[in-house]
Image (cartoon, rainbow, N blue to C red):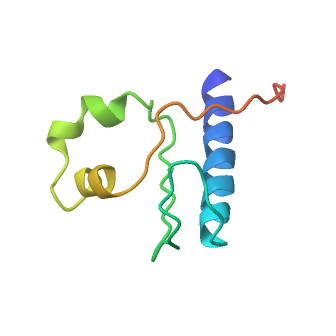
Amino acid sequence: MHKHNFLLSLITVMTILASAEAKGERVPGGEGEMPRLVVNILIDQLRSDYLETFSPLYGDEGFRQLMRGGRYYTQAVYAVAPRD
């Protein structure tokens, strides 16, 4: 149940931030430029610490490039009420 809440929260936060950036609004830590492309990747049941744990297995033109040149959030939390 907590994993579902975390994933729902992560999707919500990523959507809000992507929407703000796509509109050209400044977000904390943003450069003020509109991104050329906004990609939201969601992998069901992937714990956030696995991004760093398995990073040696990533290719230079895959997740490693996204982590190096993109933006990802390891502590994105949004309080939601349990659905059940």
- From the viewer's side, name the closer residue of 25 and 53: 25
Relative height, residue 58 to residue 77 (above, below): below
Relative height, residue 18 to residue 29 (above, below): below
Q: Quadrant of residue 70?
A: bottom left
**Horizontal and vertical percent for residue 55?**
22, 38
Q: Count numbered badges in the picture.
A: 0
Decide if residue 47 is on the left or right side of residue 17.
Answer: left
Which residue appears at 51% of the width and 56% of the height? 30
**Horizontal and vertical percent for residue 12?**
69, 47
Which residue appears at 27% of the width and 51% of the height? 68
**Horizontal and vertical percent for residue 27?**
60, 54
- From the viewer's side, name the closer residue of 72 and 20: 20
Which residue appears at 34% of the width and 31% of the height? 50
Decide if residue 29 is on the left or right side of residue 13.
Answer: left
**Horizontal and vertical percent for residue 53?**
26, 28
- From the viewer's side, name the closer residue of 20 and 12: 20
Decide if residue 67 is on the left or right side of residue 13.
Answer: left
Q: The C terminus lies in which quarter of the figure?
A: top right
Relative height, residue 25 to residue 14 (above, below): below
Decide if residue 59 is on the left or right side of residue 46.
Answer: left
Q: The N terminus lies in which quarter of the figure?
A: top right
Which residue appears at 31% of the width and 49% of the height? 67
